Amino acid sequence: MFKGIFIKNFFNLIINQGINIFIALLATRILFRTLGEAQYGLVNLALSVVLLSSITVSYGYHLNGPKRIALFRDESKKKETLINEIIVTRIIIAIGMAIILFCLTYFLGFFKSYAALLYYSLILLFSQALFPMFYFQGNDKIAWASIVNAFAKVAYLLLILLFIKRPEDATYVNFLFGITALIVYIVSWIIIYKKEKIKWAWVSIHNIKKRFVENFQFFISSIAGHVSIHGGLIILANFVNSSVLGEFALAQKIALLMRMVPVFFTQAILQEASILFKSDKTEFNRYVNRIFIIGLSITFAMGLITIIFSKWIIFLLAGSQVLYSEAILKILAFIPFMSMLNFNNMIKILVDEKKHLLTKATWVTAIVMLVLATIGGYYYGGYGLSIALVITEIVSYIVHSVLLIKNKNERA
């Protein structure tokens, strides 16, 4: 049964990511050629800043929200309350983060070189607030998520084709990305509320405070995780020109899409692993280890294929040969495999809600990444940053493993 659920969930997640990759290939090719390396680099830089900020909007509910939804499947009132409280909490945080980023840029002079880009990118915070993935994942309806994602991404691609015609249009790229997602997500929630007979209700301040306290550690660890993944491009912007930044961003975009595969493995089994963890820990370990071996095999093969065909992947995206991007992609190709090493640790932490361990591990990893990325970026530019990102994944695995072993010994 569990194997069948894993295959169904993983297959749907792969379809979902397949849509992302296909649209990303087309959009990147269009944008890179239309905007040029410099403007494309700034678009991705603004996107990285907002994505780092958007993790505050998720507030850790992408980690434990699906589990909570799964536990409340047969308790409609509790599920209704949970969904409303998560959405309202996220909207409030999105408003707060938008105000903070605007003030940092307008009044304090941060992000000067791409201020207009950043202002238009703030819409992404609100689309993240209404991202319904936690609901779909908790109800094992990931196929619905693929359909929703397809609508949003296709609409985004059409708008790019219609409105992005010259380098000066770079300002609107992330806005189009955010507005299409926001509209599709709002429509999705309307359908979900009608189908599930959920009543919308604004949440009391007391309950919002309770949600803030409840998920604070997951929130803190999520920030650290995103710093580790997306912070490198922001650091690199201080050491290279916009053209080099754009060429690096081209390769990194592919690596980040590939890095989602280990996340899919986690998402595909989290609900069933949670059930097994409570009922049969021996079977839980066997089940997780089987999926772990499959994941390592797939991500290793992905890395080899990416290295072999890196020249053609970059050519497909850029429309021309970009040697620098090709070299960077070869270094980043094994990031998914390195990330998959940490699969067992993440499952154990999430099913047992070891928030304090996750917070420690992710922040130690983030600090190491910032140090390595700064040193690597300063001395070797994009090459140094690429190596720093690969090493960071290894450090993450070691830190999570050590903390879990230490916690187990303390409890023994």
Image: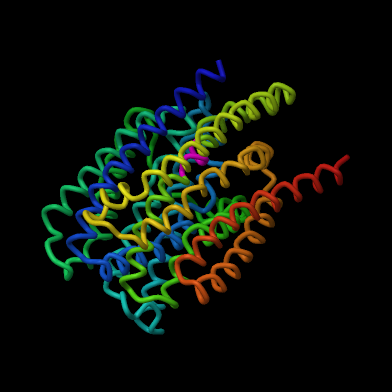
Q: What residue is drawn where x is 50% and y is 21%?
A: 5
Location of the C terminus (image quadrant): top right
Residue 9 lies, with reference to residue 19, above or below; the image says: above
Q: Work out whether residue 166 or residue 84 is closer to the camera in this orientation and state it.
A: 166
Quarter location, residue 43 = bottom left
Quarter location, residue 395 = bottom right
* Outermost residue to the bottom: 108
Q: Main secondary structure of the magenta part?
A: helix
**Image colouring:** rainbow
Q: Which residues are magenta?
A: 260-264
Residue 79: percent from the left, percent from the top? 49, 34
**Does residue 161 appear to the left or right of 5 in the view shown?**
left
Q: What residue is drawn where x is 52% and y is 46%?
A: 61
Residue 316 lies, with reference to residue 11, above or below; the image says: below
* Outermost residue to the top: 1
Residue 269: percent from the left, percent from the top? 55, 30
Asked if residue 262 lies in the magenta stretch, the reply is yes
* Outermost residue to the right: 412
Location of the N terminus (image quadrant): top right
Q: What residue is drawn where x is 12% and y is 61%?
A: 165
Q: Work out whether residue 275 or residue 321 is closer to the camera in this orientation and state it.
A: 321
Residue 370: percent from the left, percent from the top? 57, 68
**Does residue 26 appear to the left or right of 130 in the view shown?**
left
Residue 26 lies, with reference to residue 323, above or below; the image says: above
Q: What residue is drawn where x is 40% and y is 75%?
A: 240
Quarter location, residue 84 = top left
State the count of labels: 0
Residue 106 lies, with reference to residue 184, above or below; the image says: below
Residue 351: percent from the left, percent from the top? 65, 36
Asked if residue 58 lies in the magenta stretch, the reply is no
